[in-house]
């Protein structure tokens, strides 16, 4: 058969000026075309997917058939596979025909839609709207509004009556549920109570479905009124009659309404899906009740099951009625959306540039801003009476970023001022500026939380949570934080100090922060040390009170040397080293330590000024250079280890070899 296409054709429009009826006829035709496209385009995708699945199934069935047919003897299952192949081929042919038809409809509808767009634009620009047209549209809108008000009043009374019915049903259902709880499953009354429960649930479900049906009827009247209002608004705005809305005002109002209509259409679509789910659940209950009726012989139970079955059928009929009216309302909303969108687009193109820009801004930017606000002000969690939203979080982040940036700038400037205007040590200045920085940081945090709308009276909840966190997982961080405050206050460790930790780390303190300190070793490495190590462990601070430190330098000379001369030369050598400090409180000492295996052992004790970061061996190296030079000039020998080897027995063969 030849593929069937669409039966719509573009009408003849004649010559301008064009009548309102011609334009409305074209609009209705455009709506039908769009409906055909919206229905058939998804079908094409579905048919193509089904055809691909059938092709895969046919390949698999054919492969199985060949294997079974070639078996010796041929297996009976081969004929089953052959039947399945014929069935799938017929199914493939049917879907192929449906696909061709759907594609033909879409192709013709697409071409016709393009032609209709040009026709609509031509007719709209040459449209002549008379005063009678405006008057008829106004009268129709007013008449429909009056009818709607009367119908809404009647429907409201029906809704009140249905709500009154639901209340006693719910009371009886609660009593039945209470009896079920106190009745054992083996009791003969238990199935009857279960049937009564289903009966009252069906009564409530039926009343609720009828109530939803009433609400849908109200909604349908409102949609009709909205359609009549739109017709009057655009006709009067186009004709620019007295008292009508301006084009700008019309576009602004109805672009906003268009978004609402689209949302309503999506809500109705979702409601149809929900109704189908509820209908499936009702059918399941009906089937279960029917099965119980067929198996029961108890007259009382049969009566209860029959009553429940009857009410479930009523509920099923009510849900069918609801599905019909929701479908009609969705179709009405979809038709209205297409009409509004089409007319707004034509009016926008006909209007000036300013009106187009304003309409576009209202249509897109306003909706975008509303979506952004919905995300920003969505409550993520609640602390006391304060709701925490994304907006409040962003405010806190912004205020903290600005506050920390300004505090760092101020800290740096204050540091430079104190260095220039005061005689304080760099370590003292660093401690003062750090304490001021963190004090103001706490103030900035409180201001940020208060500005973001967080109730400060609920701050105890946050602090309580932090306390729990510190107790379980933040002990180390809290320990380092408190240790940092201790170091900044008592200044036992400050910037510029030369320190040595228990693990042997030696270096200069370059920075003391609230959580850690930076120690630079003599190799140029910056080591980040947690503040708790400075508080809880023993730390050697070479420059705590002053920058002097005494070094013990071992010396070994030969047994031929004069000890007094060695002591004199060692003292002279120590005085030549620039870092040596000597006064009555810091004398240079030379001690005769004892007699070693190969040398006379002395040690030189000197005080050094720690002016630069060097290891202990670096300072000792300076003294060794001078000592070696002085001892060499004085002829004092620096011995090295010697060993005597005593040979007790030598092989005769080795002696013969040596004698040769």
Image: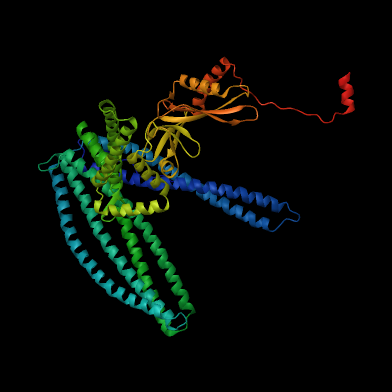
* Residue depicted at x 45% and y 78%: 293
Residue 282: give x, y in percent of width and height.
40, 67
Up-down relation of residue 100 to residue 654 (above or below):
below
**Total marks placed:** 0
Can residue 94 be spotted in the picture?
A: yes
Q: Give the residue at x 27% y 72%.
A: 167
In the displayed structure, does residue 609 sit left or right of residue 488? right
Is 475 left or right of 592, judged from the image as shown? left
Single out the residue that lies furthest toward the top: 633
**Which residue is at the front of the view, 300 or 651?**
651
Q: Nearer the viewer, residue 505 or 152?
A: 505
Task: Indicate the quadrant where residue 281 lies.
Answer: bottom left
Q: Nearer the viewer, residue 45 or 626?
A: 626
The answer to which of 9 and 120 lies nearer the viewer is 120
The C terminus sits in image quarter: top right
Place of residue 174 in the rendered image (x, y in percent of width and height, measured from the top left): 33, 75
Tell me if residue 312 comes above or below residue 570 in the rendering.
Answer: below
Q: Quadrant of residue 537?
A: top left
Residue drawn at point x = 34 percent, y = 32 percent: 427
Q: Is residue 25 visible?
A: no
- 278 above or below 360? below
Q: Position of residue 299 (x, y in %)?
A: 43, 84
x%, y% of residue 360? 25, 37
Which residue is depicted at the point 32% across and 58% down? 326
What colour-coding does the image apply?
rainbow
């Amino acid at each position: 058969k030849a593929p069937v296409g669409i039966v719509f054709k573009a009408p003849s429009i004649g010559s301008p000026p064009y009548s309102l009826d011609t334009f409305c006829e074209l609009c209705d035709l455009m709506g039908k075309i769009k409906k055909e496209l919206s229905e058939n385009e998804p079908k094409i995708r579905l048919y193509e997917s089904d055809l691909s699945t059938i092709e895969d199934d046919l390949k698999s069935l054919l492969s199985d058939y060949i294997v079974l047919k070639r078996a010796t003897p041929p297996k009976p299952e081969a004929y089953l596979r052959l039947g399945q192949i014929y069935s799938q081929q017929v199914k493939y042919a049917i879907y192929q025909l449906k696909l061709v038809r759907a594609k033909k409809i879409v192709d013709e509808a697409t071409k016709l839609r393009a032609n209709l767009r040009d026709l609509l634009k031509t007719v709209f620009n040459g449209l002549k709207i008379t005063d009678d047209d405006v008057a008829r549209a106004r009268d129709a809108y007013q008449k429909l509004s009056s009818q709607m008000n009367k119908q809404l009043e009647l429907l409201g009374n029906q809704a009140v009556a249905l709500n009154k019915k639901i209340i006693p049903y719910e009371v009886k259902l609660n009593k039945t549920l209470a009896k079920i709880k106190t009745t054992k499953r083996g009791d003969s009354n238990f199935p009857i109570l279960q049937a009564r429960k289903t009966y009252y649930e069906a009564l409530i479900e039926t009343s609720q479905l009828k109530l939803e049906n009433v609400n849908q009827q109200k909604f349908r009247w409102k949609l009709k009124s909205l359609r009549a209002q739109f017709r009057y608004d655009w006709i009067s705005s186009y004709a620019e009659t007295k008292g009508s809305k301006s084009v700008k005002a019309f576009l602004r109002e109805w672009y906003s309404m268009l978004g609402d209509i689209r949302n309503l259409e999506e809500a109705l679509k979702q409601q149809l899906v929900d109704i189908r789910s509820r209908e499936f659940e009702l059918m399941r209950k009906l089937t279960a009740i029917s099965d119980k009726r067929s198996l029961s012989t108890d007259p009382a139970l049969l009566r209860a099951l029959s009553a429940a079955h009857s009410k479930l059928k009523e509920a099923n009929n009510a849900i069918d009625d609801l599905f019909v009216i929701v479908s009609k309302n969705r179709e009405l909303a979809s038709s209205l959306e297409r009409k509004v969108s089409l007319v707004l687009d034509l009016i926008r193109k006909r209007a000036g540039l300013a009106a187009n820009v304003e309409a576009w801004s209202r249509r897109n930017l306003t909706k975008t801003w509303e979506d952004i606000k919905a995300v920003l002000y969505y409550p993520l969690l609640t602390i006391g009476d304060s709701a925490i939203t994304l907006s409040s979080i962003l405010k806190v982040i912004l205020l903290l970023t600005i506050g920390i940036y300004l505090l760092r700038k101020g800290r740096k400037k204050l540091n430079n001022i104190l260095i220039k205007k005061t005689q304080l040590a760099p370590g003292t200045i660093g401690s003062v500026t750090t304490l001021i920085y963190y004090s103001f940081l706490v103030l900035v945090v409180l201001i940020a939380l208060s500005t973001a709308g967080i109730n400060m009276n609920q701050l105890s909840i946050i602090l309580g949570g932090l306390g729990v966190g510190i107790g379980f997982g933040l002990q180390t961080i809290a320990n380092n934080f408190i240790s940092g405050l201790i170091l900044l206050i008592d200044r036992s460790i400050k910037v510029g100090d030369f320190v040595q930790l228990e693990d042997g780390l030696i270096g200069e303190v370059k920075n003391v922060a609230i959580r850690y300190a930076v120690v630079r070793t003599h190799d140029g490495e910056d080591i980040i040390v947690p503040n708790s190590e400075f508080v809880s462990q023993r730390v050697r601070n070479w420059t705590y009170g002053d920058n002097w430190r005494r070094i013990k330098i071992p010396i070994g000379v030969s047994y031929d040397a004069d000890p007094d001369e060695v002591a004199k030369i060692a003292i002279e050598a120590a005085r030549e080293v620039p870092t040596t400090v000597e006064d009555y409180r810091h004398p240079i000492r030379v001690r005769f330590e004892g007699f070693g295996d190969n040398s006379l052992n002395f040690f030189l004790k000197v005080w050094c000024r720690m002016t630069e970061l060097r290891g202990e061996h670096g300072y000792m190296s300076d003294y060794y250079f001078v000592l070696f030079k002085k001892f060499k000039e004085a002829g004092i020998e620096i011995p090295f280890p010697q060993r005597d080897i005593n040979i007790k027995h030598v092989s005769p063969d080795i002696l013969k070899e040596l004698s040769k």
